[in-house]
Amino acid sequence: MVNAKMVTLKSGRTKKVQELNYINKRGEEKTKEIILDTFKGLAITRDSVSKLTDEKDSKHIFYTFSILGDGVMDMLKACGYDNHRLNNHSELKGGLCPNATEMCKGTCYNNKIFYDGVINSKINNLLLSLQDNFIVLFVETFKKILKKDKKKNDGKKIYVRLHVDGEIYSLNYLTKLVDITRYFPSVNFFTYTKSFDILGRFLKNDSLTDNLNIMLSVYNDISDSDIDKVRAFCQRDFKIFKGRLTERQEERLSKTYKINKEVDKLKVDKKCLMACNKCLYCVYGKQDIEIVLH
């Protein structure tokens, strides 16, 4: 039985939540209220890269759109989270991150961000992305944001990163994302994906827009069959975003995950500088990138 209740917000609106008990890193018992249904509009946020950089001098502005991924979902389920709408949706039969490796799910950066507000925002975005009117919701929301930020963005290039958390979970979802990019031809959208099969199915009958760059995400425990798919995509000018392990990381992680040495044979052009607002190699997708797992 799901421990669900209705909570009234300051605005007077209500939301349906499930109370989850968990133990934090200090060994203290805590309670979270995690939503079970949509309760507000889409969250498209101005990225921390833009906030941490002097925007007066910067020529680039970043926004992000995230949905819930399997790493955080696994943590929620371990606490007893049971969302009927997500558990039984036909588009999510392959999971929220259909082709995520165990290392990807286990070391996902977003697993460290276990705050109620952040999690609820990503669940809400995920639930809304499953709706038939998702394209309209995204377009209307982002147009309002761009109008509000017009003075801040004047004369600057605008970028939207899709899925700081989350993944391309279905062919229908990818089709929606591509359609969204058509409404903003002057905005550059980019994302990283391990959903190679979904991407391949999409490209059989359609093509990506010029303002959407998809990089192939390669973790160090990728299967041999998926490496072959990556190589095939690279022949079509797709670029890779490859993980690299330090000796200490490989020694530690190899005890839990099966490290595939074939990853080292994937040659790259650049190493990630961890300075997104200055580098932009990933955004343009013109070069392969290597990043130390973090």
Image (spheres, rainbow, N blue to C red):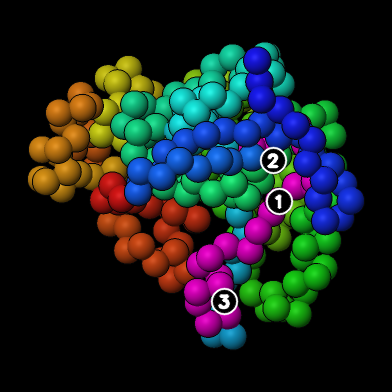
Q: Is residue 162 left or right of residue 23?
A: right
- Residue 120, image quadrant: top right
Label 2: state its secondary structure: helix
Residue at (46%, 25%) from the top-left corner? Answer: 78
The image position of residue 23, as x and y in percent, is 42, 39
Q: Give the class, few, some or many, for how many residues have Cα within 10 Å of label 2's Cα (few <14, many ≥20).
A: many
> How far apart are the alpha carbons under marks 2 and 1?
7 Å
Question: Tag 3: residue type?
Answer: Lys
Q: Is the C-beta separation of discs 2 and 3 under 8 Å?
A: no
Residue 59, which numbered label? 3
Q: Is the C-beta separation of discs 2 and 1 under 8 Å?
A: yes
Residue 125, which numbered label? 2
* Magenta stretch in the rendered image: 34-55
Marks 3 and 1: which is nearer the front? 1
Question: Tag 1: residue type?
Answer: Ala
| Nearer to us in this view, 45 or 24 | 24
Question: Tag 2: residue type?
Answer: Asn
Residue 43, which numbered label? 1
The image position of residue 268, as x and y in percent, is 27, 47
The image position of residue 62, as x and y in percent, is 59, 63
| Nearer to us in this view, 267 or 241 | 241
> How far apart are the alpha carbons under marks 3 and 1?
24 Å
| Nearer to us in this view, 86 or 2 | 2
Label 3: state its secondary structure: loop
> How far apart are the alpha carbons under marks 2 and 3?
28 Å
Q: Give the class, few, some or many, for how many residues have Cα within 10 Å of label 3's Cα (few <14, many ≥20).
A: some
Q: Earlier in the sequence, mark 3 or mark 1?
A: 1
